[in-house]
Amino acid sequence: MWRAFFVTLILALTPHAILNAKIRKVEVLYEWKQVVYGFATKEDRQDAIDNDNLIPENAKPIDVAVDYHSKKGKRVFTTTPRFTTGIPYTLAVVTDKTEENGPVLMPYPDYSWHNSNGSSCEKITSVFRVAITECNQMIVVDTGVIGDIQHCPPQLLVIDLNTDTLSHRYVFDPSIYVDVASLFITPIALVSDPPPKGSCSKVKVYVADVTFHGLVVYDLELDAAWRVENRFMYPDPDQGLHTIANEKFILMDGMFGLASDGKKLYFHPLASINEYSVPLSVINNRTIFEEDVEAVPHAFRKTGERSSSCAAQAMDSQNNLYFVTFNPIKLTRWSPNKPYTPKTELDIPADPKLIEFVSGMKVHKNKAGIEELWMTSNRFQKIARGTLNFNEVNFRLLRRPLDDIQKVSTSNKFRQGPPQMDLRMRQGPAQMNLKVMQGPPHMNLRVNK
């Protein structure tokens, strides 16, 4: 009797949960066995060949960014950093033309922009990741490094996506980085004066230095940068041995994944199972860190602990934090309404073979106003062990709309009084778990599929 009553009550109170019980798949938009580099002219291709910079098997895509432009349409960008030589260009747009190994890339903004041998620091040397703002800006952080040689100082470029031209360049001062020891790999950008009312002049960019263990803050309005360091940015030696798809490798990367809810910066080293945070009001204050890059250490806090290490992360407008854990391989989100613990990780159904190592992750809003999670997966465990098989698909760009997740999140935000419900979708037979606690009834509906 009581079971029937509670089940009836659950069904009455969870229309969004029931409607969204159907599993939505992660969509594969592009995939490669081996990167395919295209060129606008035969002369450009020959130039790459002549400089020993067309060795496609050396290329490893690690990031994705999407521009839903009102006039230019949708453009998908990816990066292939110059971990070694043989990379003709390091920032590309994905075309609809496909060859045997996958879709053809084209250099962005064009081939002339790419510094293939480090001889011109006015060009782009090597890019790990980019950020796209709501102001039609692409923020490009160029490491200046090819292999293990610092050819040029790191620089930040702002490209106007309306015209595909450079609108601003900032070259980092030597006090912000150490040659080769520093590697600027992950930028996120926050705009304080967005359109339509704002002028897009109040932009701050936060950049992870993965190997010299720090954070760089760049203020576009001031045209100034400063460095921030904290012990939480270092790798955990106990978390440096990773297992992905039964392959083990060591990667002692520090400061890696960044995200923000507009109030705090969330971050983690790759070799760690912890997520940390710091108020933006602290790190945005340049004067605090001018004399001491390790100032105010107690402003940095441990936010939570994961079930496993992860690489990239991204946050949506509802402050859900998304990431893919290594072992087991699973696409996961943390809700802002719950403590950040392994028990509160909410799994999002995804084929583990598609997301073996997600090195790039972004949340973009499409033309319909729906936020989408975009990911780059590249099977890094095979890259690290030298076991890549170019007869198999090795690199993918993936997409998953978030409207169903966000509707469930919104419908579950009850205030005082009404019961609270949580929908989890996992693999396996359908089960319902009813929990009655002290005070008003709390119900937890889990749909396993």
Image (cartoon, rainbow, N blue to C red):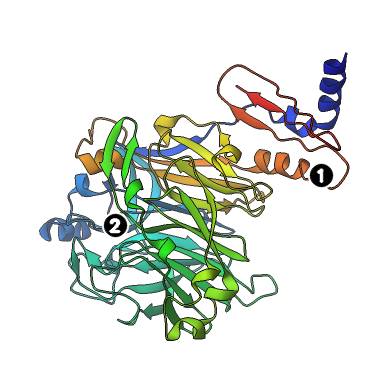
The residue where tag 2 is placed is 81
Give the quadrant of residue 381: top left
Query: Considering only order in the chain, which callout, 2 or 1, is on the residue closer to the N terminus?
Result: 2
Mark 1 secondary-structure assignment: loop
Q: Which mark is residue 414?
A: 1
Circle 1: residue type: Phe
Please, is residue 444 above or below residue 385 in the view?
A: above
Mark 2 secondary-structure assignment: loop
Q: Nearer the viewer, residue 187 or 263?
A: 263
Q: Position of residue 240 (x, y in %)?
A: 31, 47
Identity of the residue furthest to the top in this view:
1
Alpha carbon distance from label 1 to label 2: 46 Å
Q: Nearer the viewer, residue 201 or 339?
A: 339
Give the quadrant of residue 449: top right
Q: Position of residue 106 (x, y in %)?
A: 33, 54
Please, is residue 202 above or below residue 420 in the view?
A: below
Please, is residue 391 above or below residue 138 in the view?
A: above
